[in-house]
Image (tube, helix red, strand yellow):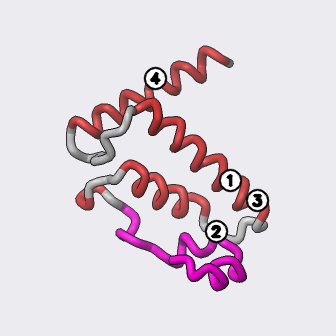
Amino acid sequence: PDNAMKEMCKLQCSIIEKGQKAGQFRNRSCPLSLVLLLQQVSHSSALIWTVLGGDFDYAKQVRLLFETLLDVDEAYRVSQDYQKELLLQMIPREISETHALL
């Protein structure tokens, strides 16, 4: 299992490096750092989705966050440039209203 995780990480780093070189990913941070952050986004979004009883579209939410984190060039984005309603679905209403988020 440990070797499989290393190989998956190498593959993900390779994909990010290629995207950076091609100008598809404008975030020029270290690919390994980006892989770790993308994994954290995926895991934390899954936790929030579970806690909220599956009350938002997990795939769309993660896609939006991945595109934002990688700073994907507009020509390659699937998500709208800024989808406030998707982000707000992950935050309890009382918190977003109290702190005027987004």
Residue 34 position within the rendered picture, expressed as x and y whole percent measured from the top left: 45, 39
Local crowd size for mark 3, using a 10 Å CA cut-off: few (<14), some (14–19), many (≥20): few
**Separation of marks 3 and 2 at Cα, in angstroms:** 11 Å
Q: Which residue is mark 1?
A: 46
The answer to whether 77 appears left or right of 68 in the picture is left
- Tag 3 secondary structure: helix
Q: Residue at x 72, y 54 (%)?
A: 47
The tag earlier along the polypeptide, 4 or 2, is 4
Q: Is residue 88 magenta?
A: yes
Q: Secondary structure at mark 1?
A: helix
CA gap, disc 4 to disc 2? 30 Å
Q: Nearer the viewer, mark 3 or mark 2?
A: 2
Q: Magenta stretch: give its range.
A: 78-102
Upstream in the sequence, badge 1 or badge 2?
1
- 4 or 3: tag closer to the N-terminus: 4
Find out whether the residues at labels 1 and 2 contact each other: C-beta distance under 8 Å: no
Q: Secondary structure at mark 2?
A: loop
